[in-house]
Image (tube, coloured by chain):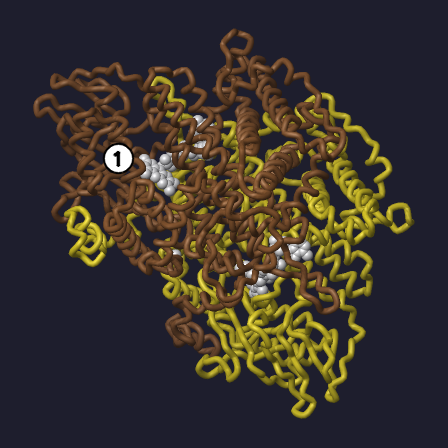
Chain colours: A brown, B yellow
Amino acid sequence: MAEAVAVDHLAGERSKAQFDVDAMKIVWAGSKHAFDIADRMARLVASDPVFRKDNRTMLERKELFKTTLRKAAHAWKRISQLHLTEEEAMMFRFFVDEPAYVDLHWGMFVPAIRGQGTEEQQKKWLPMAYKMQIIGCYAQTELGHGSNVQGLETTATFDPKSDEFIIHSPTLTSSKWWPGGLGKVSTHAVVYARLITDGQDHGINGFIVQLRSLDDHSPLPGVTIGDIGTKFGNGAYNTMDNGVLRFDHVRIPRNQMLMRVSQVTREGKFIQSDVPRQLLYGTMVFVRQTIVSDASKALSRAVCIAVRYSAVRRQFGSQDGGPETQVIDYKTQQDRLFPLLASAYAFRFVGEWLKWLYTDVTQRLQANDFSTLPEAHACTAGLKSLTTSTTADGIEECRKLCGGHGYLCSSGLPELFAVYVPACTYEGDNIVLLLQVARFLMKTVSRLGSGKQPVGTTAYMVKAPELMQCKCEVQEAKDWLKPTVILQAFEARSVRMAVNCAQNISKAQNPEEGFYELSADLVEAAVAHCQLIIVSKFIEKVEQEIHGHGVKEMLQILCNVYALSLIHKHLGDFISTGSITPKQGALANEQLRSLYSQVRPNAVAMVDAFNYTDHYLGSALGRYDGNVYPKLYEEAWKDPLNDSVVPDGYHEYIKPLLKQNFGVARL
Amino acid sequence: MAEAVAVDHLAGERSKAQFDVDAMKIVWAGSKHAFDIADRMARLVASDPVFRKDNRTMLERKELFKTTLRKAAHAWKRISQLHLTEEEAMMFRFFVDEPAYVDLHWGMFVPAIRGQGTEEQQKKWLPMAYKMQIIGCYAQTELGHGSNVQGLETTATFDPKSDEFIIHSPTLTSSKWWPGGLGKVSTHAVVYARLITDGQDHGINGFIVQLRSLDDHSPLPGVTIGDIGTKFGNGAYNTMDNGVLRFDHVRIPRNQMLMRVSQVTREGKFIQSDVPRQLLYGTMVFVRQTIVSDASKALSRAVCIAVRYSAVRRQFGSQDGGPETQVIDYKTQQDRLFPLLASAYAFRFVGEWLKWLYTDVTQRLQANDFSTLPEAHACTAGLKSLTTSTTADGIEECRKLCGGHGYLCSSGLPELFAVYVPACTYEGDNIVLLLQVARFLMKTVSRLGSGKQPVGTTAYMVKAPELMQCKCEVQEAKDWLKPTVILQAFEARSVRMAVNCAQNISKAQNPEEGFYELSADLVEAAVAHCQLIIVSKFIEKVEQEIHGHGVKEMLQILCNVYALSLIHKHLGDFISTGSITPKQGALANEQLRSLYSQVRPNAVAMVDAFNYTDHYLGSALGRYDGNVYPKLYEEAWKDPLNDSVVPDGYHEYIKPLLKQNFGVARL
Ligand SMILES: Cc1cc2nc3c(=O)[nH]c(=O)nc-3n(C[C@H](O)[C@H](O)[C@H](O)COP(=O)(O)OP(=O)(O)OC[C@H]3O[C@@H](n4cnc5c(N)ncnc54)[C@H](O)[C@@H]3O)c2cc1C
Ligand SMILES: Cc1cc2nc3c(=O)[nH]c(=O)nc-3n(C[C@H](O)[C@H](O)[C@H](O)COP(=O)(O)OP(=O)(O)OC[C@H]3O[C@@H](n4cnc5c(N)ncnc54)[C@H](O)[C@@H]3O)c2cc1C
Ligand SMILES: [Ca+2]
């Protein structure tokens, strides 16, 4: 976003760009329409003093939390005052850029009722939720169980006498633990608990439970709630009241069990409805699609800061008293930074594709076609895992790329990292997810040749016989620019790793044992498969019609950077499977180096294309105008420690030391 | 450290150990003597309520800083009351485990005067510093220059009229920025500035400058000082007052320039003394040796937490209602965790060896033998870089290994990460250091065959002709257990990567250009060389006499895990250089898997051997007794947000929302 700037220290960089930045902005946003909304909402938020973030990392927890409550309420007010559409409201909240209970209310509580509630239940609860007359959270995880949902211990025992469920926390480890918005705000929760009727355990089901009084916000009888304490980083996710919750025989009416998929009758009989359980997959695909899309946003944000600062920062290499070298000109800096820039774009496009996939899945579900669901499920699980892991590591790498100054909160990077990393854990631990992908791959491999065709992102496996044999045809560096060559190398690597695993598993006593023993290798095979998906979606994107001078060419370059940097990083996979030769690996690296030189003059413009405001970036180092040093300097003085020249504690703990009379002072 | 525990939830794990844990503790500590001191100091600190850390991540900056001042003063008092030896005092401070101005005073200010001051200067300043009558910091880095020390802008202009230097900050970017202890505490600093006499610039020199009044702590005239603001993480490095400092023509007497290596005479003549500049390398080797030793401590601490929690945590795999699988039994968990356990030990031993190297270097310096200095310098630079990078990444991996709960500050891991990561940046940015190693390697390669023998850790390069040709002899997995096989593979890989780089450089227009173009590859060659050093020192360690039942055997296993996990991780290097074949790579992986099974029963005992107190670990997840859940639960309630049931802000920002009357409230 072109800010009103006095002097643009990056003007020189911007003038070097070889493509139409405004056109690239549209591509990044997805459409002109999406761009306009994002641009407008970002400005609205940035210009509103209530949404200031610059002091966030300095506030102690209570103060921080209160400002979050204020922002959430103010956002709600503005959204209705301005009559924003749902799409606009989402963008508005996004640019407020502060985790809060509303995320769970809109992102988990409402969808859970929509997805798992009967029509009657939806009619009763949703209007209240839409108006925020009730605020809800999603209470699944317990102290003792996260990944293994089937192991949850909270019980919901049907009492036929009163037609009620008794919600109870039988053990310490059954305490609900982690739900966002639970600790201090939510009035209601969807609580997952073991359904017990007539002494029989029917497994985990969801229940709508009121937690707090709508009059004075005090917890209802039998309900103990609190916040689970400080989390990683300053500011960051500490704006969220992740909570602990214990039930002491709390009674709720029978009709508060979410009954779309299973029901309990007045008599206490447990019935499965004929609504297929796969329906729940739809929601999962949706949630994960948003996580992938968030990954591209978080990574692009970090990359934007690191690219701009690397163009401002100069160190070494001054000749005859001239300016020193911009650190972005160092090849090591490029080698760490440009693949991340390429990844941000790659994740953006695979996220866009996932949106399409979600629509596709939804339509098929409506048509009772469940055939593509397992593949869609595995694919989204893998992409969630891969994009969030890369993004978390990438943000920290961007921080390191900024040298010492990246360690200051005023760089924005520490908070971005701290607030981002749990994405590797929530909505499925990334390793657990990759193991699910691997399981699906093994199934797919075992069925090859059985007549059952692999679908969707596994369709390439039909070519397994060729891919097991094929030889990469690269003879000189520039051969690596051919999409077909890249695709074949990634497909060959992926198939061969999967087939290798399958063969090794088959040597074990039994498949379960084999899968367990080889799980580390299986995770690598799953990664290979998911990287192929991202590469192929990037290639597809670049093959589409793309407007704007030089835009397609730049994306082509980034696509190649993405693919070739992965080949370099996973060279062992590619060579040991025989998908490429060592010589071809060296050529890929050579080509990569020359691509870096093509990215270099366009780097700043490529991050400008994200169209992020300085408010959203929240970084002294990433400022649009590159005027880094005065801003860093200014930010420093805001620290509470600078309230006084002589620090609190001087008289008790410094002076006695200097005066050698610490015997008398109360040290 | 065996705590007094009611129930030991990890007793079962401990009984599985196949080696003598007490003997391993001695090996880890370095000697019985070192063990005794560490054990005693750790207990002393742990039992003193002043040193509590459990609330550290909840304190706002000023409060936090005040508690640090208190701890530092209290430590100083206890150290003198107890008449601790220097060795004991160091350990005592180490277990206080909180970055503070004293670290810079003892670790940088005093050594700078010792190393760069004349005898007279040492006599004047050191006694005051030893008694802490003055407190000093190390003011080198500026807003505009960190890595490139030669680019510093602060000036020290000699004024022959008054026989003084005028210290001045001519630009904003010349502001000193980052020095620890500067912001709020130091009374003095060693300031690095461009020496100017008679209009001539003599480059960077050190000066002792008083900053604050010894009476009332106010900054002296012409001195502007402040704290540079919040840094990454809660608690963490925010206990340190990293500072900003500007000089407005501040005058200091001529004899406050550190004059051991260069002098300015009364007349303003600049003279280089005959003391060789290489002397300064000695200090660098010392400082980096301590950083490597700290890396092993930080990594072992994270690994200790993750191993214990992984043995407590159970998820999935319950059969017939029995207990679920301990997550440490999952192969993916082992594959992420055990190489880090092995690395902690590897870094411990290479750190021990560096201590020897420092002694060796010091003795040679005294004998005017500078021949090994460049090699020692490159070697320590590389090991600093490699161990700190691996440790930073390793801590975060340990956090992820703890699932959701690792994200809570009460797990101890977020703070450990945040406080550790700057080690990748200070004392030399890790990439800049690796480039120095690479430069040394290229020099070494270019001299091969010139008769000038490579020394120290590069001595293996004499064998370059064989190593370029040799074939790895592994035929079955267990061949990978032979130290000679492992060493040869690492040596071959390292030599071949270095020689490849040298050859590619020679194709460039000129060597400088070539070095620049290939710098990303050069960094990889430097990493390969440094990994070889660590592997070889681990092997040497295991070949020494080691007492205690099973201790040597366990270390042998870890040594192999370390080496083979590196082969797997860098398979591309090993195979593409032809150092091993793909088949041999697969065998290495197979062997690695079976080593994991041998580590498994010993894992908890291997981290017990670090002998860390629960106080030092500071982790609800890493507790010695494994009683994780009650502790997590208890910690949660300490959060300030839990001071009241209904949160501050409810009436202003939640109630109006629920009641739909946010029009009237001041949102
Ligand atoms: C910031 C944040 C917000 C959250 N918000 C919510 C919320 O709103 N509502 C809610 O209900 N929950 C929430 N959660 C909880 C979250 O969903 C869980 O933490 C997550 O599912 C991971 O489960 P876990 O913590 O039990 O990890 P664990 O399963 O205990 O993982 C520990 C380790 O074991 C490994 N592991 C586990 N199972 C296997 C296996 N089968 N094979 C191999 N390895 C395995 C993992 O890879 C990991 O390394 C939140 C968590 C966080 C951090
Ligand atoms: C917690 C902390 C404590 C500190 N304490 C002190 C202290 O007490 N006293 C003190 O004087 N200083 C201190 N420092 C400053 C520290 O020494 C510097 O931050 C460090 O030297 C790195 O320099 P920089 O910040 O200028 O990084 P930069 O050099 O600006 O690094 C930015 C990027 O440029 C790259 N780069 C730079 N040069 C090259 C090159 N030639 N080739 C390739 N890439 C290059 C780097 O790899 C990095 O990615 C501290 C810093 C921190 C974070
Ligand atoms: Ca804080």
Mark 1 residue type: Val
Toward the viewer: B513 or B293? B513
Quarter placement of the C terminus of chain B: bottom left
Q: On screen, A500 above or below B509?
A: above
The residue wearing badge 1 is A110
Residue B405: percent from the left, percent from the top? 39, 40
Judged from this view, the residue extending furthest toward the bottom is B161
Total numbered badges shown on the rendered structure: 1
Quarter of the image where one finds residue A210: top left
Query: Quadrant for ligand 3?
Result: bottom left
Residue B210: percent from the left, percent from the top? 56, 80
Left or right? Give the position of B438 relative to B14. right
Judged from this view, the residue extending furthest toward the top is A450
Q: On screen, B193 above or below A433?
A: below
Residue A244: percent from the left, percent from the top? 28, 41
Toward the viewer: A326 or A112? A326
Q: On screen, A186 above or below A581?
A: below
Left or right? Give the position of A544 relative to A270. right
